[in-house]
Amino acid sequence: MNKAILIDAENSRVTMVTLPNGYKEWHKVMKCDMATVAFYIDDHDSVLVDDEGMLKQPERFFLYDGFHHPLAGNGLVVDCDEEGNTVDCNATEEAVRAKVKFMNKTELMIYLYANQ
């Protein structure tokens, strides 16, 4: 089991979590069926998101400072070693919280309009 950071858009929370082994268990933590890497934070950590997030008519989103657009659904900050095995993420809960802005649909539309 490894430490990761859950970006819980539904509840507007960022929390450290312990990941069960196996990506299917990660999906349960993220409340999704499929996850994909949205972007890399640095040389180590990456942010996974619900691969089908926009197809589910989401109500909640998050924007990660430095990434080019808001993301639908929940996110998960994870890290892996040189062999691709999951290890504890390097980011801290506080650092991720400082970079995340949660949005509802109205806030998303305002953001998109202002940044077109």
Image (cartoon, rainbow, N blue to C red):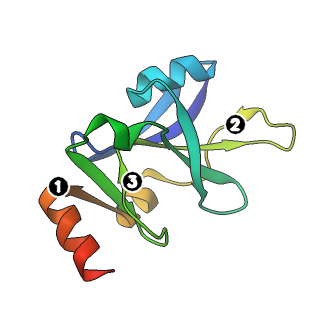
- Amino acid type at circle 2 is Val
Frontmost residue, 12 versus 115:
115
Say which residue appears at 52% left-offset and 29% top-offset.
34
Numbered disc 2: secondary structure: strand
* Mark 1 neighbour class, 10 Å CA radius: few under 14, some 14 to 19, many 20 or more: few
Looking at the rendered image, the disc whose residue lies closer to the viewer, 2 or 3, is: 3
Q: Answer with mark 1 or mark 2, whichever residue precedes in sequence.
A: 2
Residue 22's image quarter? top right
Left or right: residue 38 versus residue 30 is right
For this orientation, the residue located farthest to the left is: 106
Label 3 crowding class (10 Å Cα cut-off): few <14, some 14-19, many 20+? Answer: many
Q: Earlier in the sequence, mark 2 or mark 3?
A: 3
Query: Of marks 3 and 1, which one's residue comes earlier in the chain?
Result: 3
Front tag of 1 and 2: 1
Residue plotted at (25% across, 42% down): 58
Q: Residue at x 43, y 58 (%)?
A: 96
**Residue 113: horizontal and vertical position, in percent?**
23, 76
Q: Position of residue 63 (x, y in %)?
A: 36, 62
Establish if 17 lies above or below 70. above
Q: Determine whether 89 is above or below 52 in the image.
A: below
> What's the residue type where badge 1 is placed?
Lys
Q: Residue at x 43, y 36 (%)?
A: 52
Instruction: Tell me the residue that label 1 is attached to.
Output: 105
In the rendered view of the protein, which quadrant contains the N terminus?
top right
Q: Which mark is residue 87?
A: 2
User: According to the image, label 3 marks what residue?
Assistant: 71
